[in-house]
Amino acid sequence: MHELAITEDILTAALDAARRAGARAIRRLHLMLSSASHIEPETVRLHFTLISRGTPAEGAELVFNTRAVEQVCRHCGRVFTATSDLTCPACGAPALPEPADHEMTLEDIDVDVPAERS
Ligand SMILES: [Zn+2]
């Protein structure tokens, strides 16, 4: 599976966003998973715990939300919510695979920002 690569991308994006915000620590990452994704949240958590060590994201909580991806079957025209099976529930025709970079995206981060000094 490719969870590790995707988790690395998410961590990089979160650290970039935290740096831009002047944050010293990331408390929480809000992630959006496609309903068509094969990604296992528990696997992402394990990878994240390992690769975030020593970064401002160490110990951050991962919050997963699922985005229902609707597809129209190219074979029978049925509209359905894509799952990781990636087949039409009506006729079994293959559904369109979700682009890899849409499977899991970083929606938002909660950070600790040092108090402003004026
Ligand atoms: Zn169909």
Image: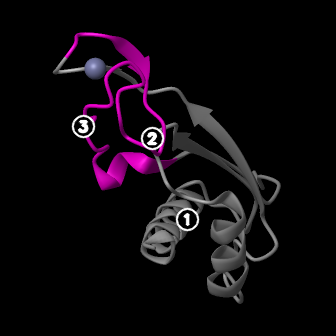
Relative to 79, 30 lies left or right:
right
Task: Report helix, strand or loop for mark 3.
Answer: loop
> Label 1 is placed on what type of residue?
Arg
> Label 2 is placed on what type of residue?
Ala
What quarter of the picture does the N terminus occupy?
Answer: bottom left
Q: Name the front one of labels 1 and 2.
A: 2
The percent coordinates of residue 113 (x first, y second) are 76, 56
> Label 3 is placed on what type of residue?
Leu
Relative to 69, 78 lies left or right:
left
What residue lies at 62% left-to-right and 60% top-to-bottom? 40
Q: Which residues are magenta?
A: 76-105
Task: Report helix, strand or loop for mark 1.
Answer: helix
Relative to 56, 112 lies left or right:
right
Asked if disc 1 and disc 2 are in contact, CB closer than 8 Å, the reply is no
The residue labelled by disc 3 is 96
Whether ligand 1 has any atom under 8 Å from the Cβ at mark 3 is answered as no
